[in-house]
Structure formats: C-alpha cells, structure tokens
Image (cartoon, rainbow, N blue to C red):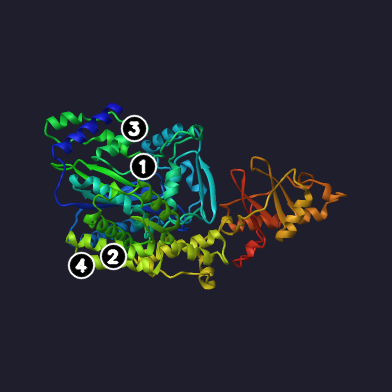
Amino acid sequence: MYRKAIKDIKAFEQLIADQKIDKSAPKIGLEQEICIVNTELEPAKGALQLLDDLDLPEYTNELALFNLEVNGQPLLLEGDCFSRAETELLRLLKEGSTAAKRREMRLLLCGILPTLQYRHLAFSYMTPIKRYKVLSKMLADLRGDKFEIYLQGVDELIMSLESVLFEACNTSFQLHLQIHPDEFREKYNWSQLIAGPVLSACTNSPLLFGRELWSETRIALFKQSLDTRSSKNHLRKKLPRVYFGEGWLQGPPAELWKNELMRFPLLLTSDDFEDPMLRLQENKVPDLRAIRLHNGTTYTWNRLCYGPFGDNPHLRIECRYLPAGPSVVDEIANFAFWVGLMEGQPEDLQSFWHKLDFRIAKDNFIKAARTGMDSVFNWLGQSIPAKDLLVKILLPIAEQGLQRKGISTKDIERYLGVIRERVQKEQTGAQWQIKTFRNLTQKQSRSIALKTMTHQMTEYQQQNIPVSQWTINGYNDAHHVDFAQHQPLRVEDLMSTDIFIVRAEDSLALVKQIMNWKNIHHVPVENKKGNLIGLITDGIIARSKLSDQDQCLAKDIMITEIITADAKDSVEKAASLLNKHQLSCLPVTYEGKLVGILTDKDLKKLNLLAPTAKVP
C-alpha cells in the first residue's frame, strides 16, 4: 500500500510538471451533512431507510445512522451561482424532509445536535458498512485504549468511548473551490490565514450533551474523537490525525500528501489500485486512489483535493471547518463569504507567509473555535476584535473577490448582507443557542430546554430565516405547557444531574451536613469505581436507631436494595414506581453509573400527577 501511495505522489508531481492540471474557469461545490431526528427530536436510526426511499445520487450515508450527506453539483463560479446553489440545496432538503416525514422523522441542520445523548453513541448507531467498522477498529488499535474527550468551556465534559462515534456528533457544511495549479501554494496559505476570522462569524456548535463548551465545539471534539496518540510517548512530538497544520506550504501541493504519508500510518487498503505511471504513459488521467484513500483518513481543516475527471484533472481546496446550519441561507452566505475572500486575496498579501509566523494563524483558529465573535485576532501583527476585522477588512475583500469573478450584484448583496447583519448584531448560531438555552433553563430542565430549543431551530430552518433574525426565546408558560402535552416525557427530561454523592467510608455527619447545606433529602453512595451501591435519605436517618450517628459512616446506614429508573423510562412509569414503593426519589442509572435523580417534586413541575395505576 505504501508503494502504491508513493507511486501516486510521483504521478501527481508529473501531472503538475507536465501542465496537465485544469486551468480553466474555477468551479465550486458543497457537501451538506444532516441530522435525522424522530418526533421527540432525538437522533433517529433512519439513514438507510431514507436512502432507499429517496434513491437520489446526491444523498449518501455517513458514519452514524442518524446522519446523511447531500453532495451538490459543481457550478461554475459566475453570475448567480450561489443563489442557484441555495435553490438546489433547498430542493434536495425538501425531498429528504418529505421522505423523512413519511417515516415520522425530520431533518435538521446543526453543527452538533442539541438533544444528542451519550447512549446514542452505542455501536448499534454506527452505519453497518465494513469501511466504518474497519476504520474504527484500526484507530482504536493504534490508540491502544478507549477514545477519550476532555472539553472545557463554561462547563466541563470528560467521557470515553470504545469506537470513533464521538466523531458522529459533528455535522458540517463543507465547501469546495477549484484552484489554478500555479496559484495553489499562495491560495492554500491564504486559506489558512483567513480560517480563524471566517470561523468566528459562522460558529453554530456551542453545546454537547447539555454542556456549554466552545463556540464551535466541533473543532475540539473532532480532533479528540480520532486522536490515536498515547501519553506513553509524551516527550515526542506527534500530530493528531485531525489538525490545522504545522507550517506554511513552502513548495508544490504534493508536499501536503508527502507530509501525511510520513506522519500517519495507513488505515485502509484495497485490491483494485491502478498503476498511475502506466496511465500517464497511455495519456490517460490517473485516479491516484491509494493516496486519496489515505488523504481521506487524515483530516486537515483546509484539505487538498484532486479531481480525476474529464481530460484534465483539477485541484481543489476543501474548507472543512464550517458547521451545518443554522439555515440554508446562512450556509450559502458562509460559502459566498469564504469564496469571495479566497478570490479577493489582495496583491500585497500574495506572499504574506514569508514574514508571518504560522503559529499566528493557528492561534487565531483556536481562538475562533473557543470564543467565536468574542475573539480578538492577531491580523498581520495587529490585535483586532473579530467584529471590526470582519466588517472593516474582510467583508470588503470578499466583495471585491466576488465582483472580480463576475458574481451577480444581487447575490453579492444578499449573501454578504446576511454575514454583515449577523456580525453587526453579534448573533451567530452559537450565540443564539447559548442565549436561548440559558433563558429556557431558568425554569426548565436541561433536557426539556434542549428539546424546546431544537424545536425552534427546526421551525426557523423550514422558513429559511437567517439566524441574525431569530428571536431569543425565553421561558414561556403557554409554549412550555404545549410542548409538554405533545411530547412523551421521559425520566431524563425531568431528572436532576447536579448530584451530591458520598462514598461508603464517608462520615454520616458529612452526609447530614450536605443535606442541610443544600436543602436536599437524598444522597447516593458510590464506590471507588463510580458505581451506585447505596442511598441515604433524611427519612432513613430519622428512623435510624443508631445511638451516636455522628460517629457512624455512610455504609452503616445506607440502604443497598435500591429501586432505580432508566433515563429512557416514561415519567408515568417512574411515578408509578414512586407510588408503589412509597418512595420520594429514584436514582437514575446508565450501565450501572448514576446519571441523575428524579424526585416526587420533579413530577409536579409540568403539572404532571403521579398515576394511580401500577406499572410492573
């Protein structure tokens, strides 16, 4: 396989040397990743059924069964190409939505689905295609351990998983721009420089599992979800398979592929590779499949793409860092903004990379992912707030670039206007989600708030309204009651996840103080492995006949025969358990781990009364 990949690189260099790379008018293209949700707005395993129903070549599967991808047709970069791209994407999404509705599902565009739960990353949610299983196993073998994520923003998130399905949390809107081969180095370096500022205006993934993390959490999550590095060799420098880059491109584009082949082990192989040098001798276009296959398992945010189509193959830069959503018009505006910047690169910045430290561009990118529109960037040696950089410098460059390519005035005004309004109002998708989520959680559980917010997102998307015009919705009693009455509520929708726990060896005096300080009536007991082993309530303490409680330990008084609930249980079943066993709370567990507590008071928040019927 390595020999085949090396041969492909040599053939690629020969194509460039022989001037056989397409130099005609550039084309643009897009890839739209989509979330599939059920009537409860949670991930639905509907991808394969929808693909069968649709039978459209533009639709294809993704890693998880709750994702789909739409591939747009290439368009010449001219005239009204962006409005045509929007019309075509809306048409395809409408067909997909119609098929989904027949199966009681919906399609949603968002960087990370707000209602996603850890249980949705089980192996049963992986698309049953050999390539995905092989890729997951190979990456896990290279890592030698579970995949772990640790993300820190307003909240923190620490989790592990045995497969690469953390990657399936991400959905993106990927952009393609054909590049003249003689300009590739300058254009690629420019794409790296503008990445941070562009991302800051387009963030749409601030929440994961109900935690507030980065403005564009996808960036960190994607990197960690495929990271095969080990702490055993912590003194050696080793790149993750998802990375921004380590320096400016100094030579021809083949350097990018050479670097990937040297840095990263091959993961996938095949038996049907052609001889690229023989194809060149026959004056035919080689497909370079071996190196392209490897390129598909290494993930730079700006990626070199080779298209072996027609008489002359072409080169593209693929922009991979932008999220799906918030609406189609927002996405096409992002597309036009990025393409305009790429084509509007000022002449005096053609060789900026000779004097500028690459780490500035990399730092800007991480800043944008973390703090979005609140970032302050280093732009060519000056510190500039994101809003000022975007409005005063980059939007004019993008406008000039689009004009230079003959894009219609109507398209330029429409799509750059969407970006301008979004930036001036300081309301990206991420900012809208955070403000709405915080307002809703003032009187709702996180789970209900996430579903309510997701419902609002679907409504705005169906009307194709730009996110700058979405209202910041807070808690509304009428809407809240309507939502509760029309959605089957589960334990996870009402349970509390902010739990105070103790260990079996902890003092009972500490337990009593925790109850007193926090005004709570239940304290779970865990062992060193984090498994639930007991429960102490104020009723148990009051009924205890221990003579000197303050000298006792938690294990002396805790009950060990615990009735628990599953997060997926209906609230009616939970209420019935509370009635049947005369309990005031139910610990909620997942795979033996405590994930929440549901109390009798929780069931009254939505005017839900515990049923009298008993559920086995």
Residue picked out by circle 2: 416
Where's the N terminus, which quadrant?
top left
Q: Nearer the viewer, mark 3 or mark 1?
A: 1
Residue picked out by circle 1: 246
Q: CA distance from mark 2 to mark 3?
A: 40 Å
Considering only order in the chain, which callout, 3 or 4, is on the residue closer to the N terminus?
3
- The image position of residue 353, as x and y in percent, is 29, 48
Amino acid at the residue labelled 1: Glu
Work out whether residue 45 or residue 210 is closer to the camera in this orientation and state it. 210
Residue picked out by circle 3: 262
Q: Nearer the viewer, mark 4 or mark 1?
A: 1
Q: CA distance from mark 3 to mark 1?
A: 14 Å
Residue picked out by circle 4: 409
Amino acid at the residue labelled 2: Leu
Considering only order in the chain, which callout, 1 or 2, is on the residue closer to the N terminus?
1
Work out whether residue 119 or residue 16 is closer to the camera in this orientation and state it. 16
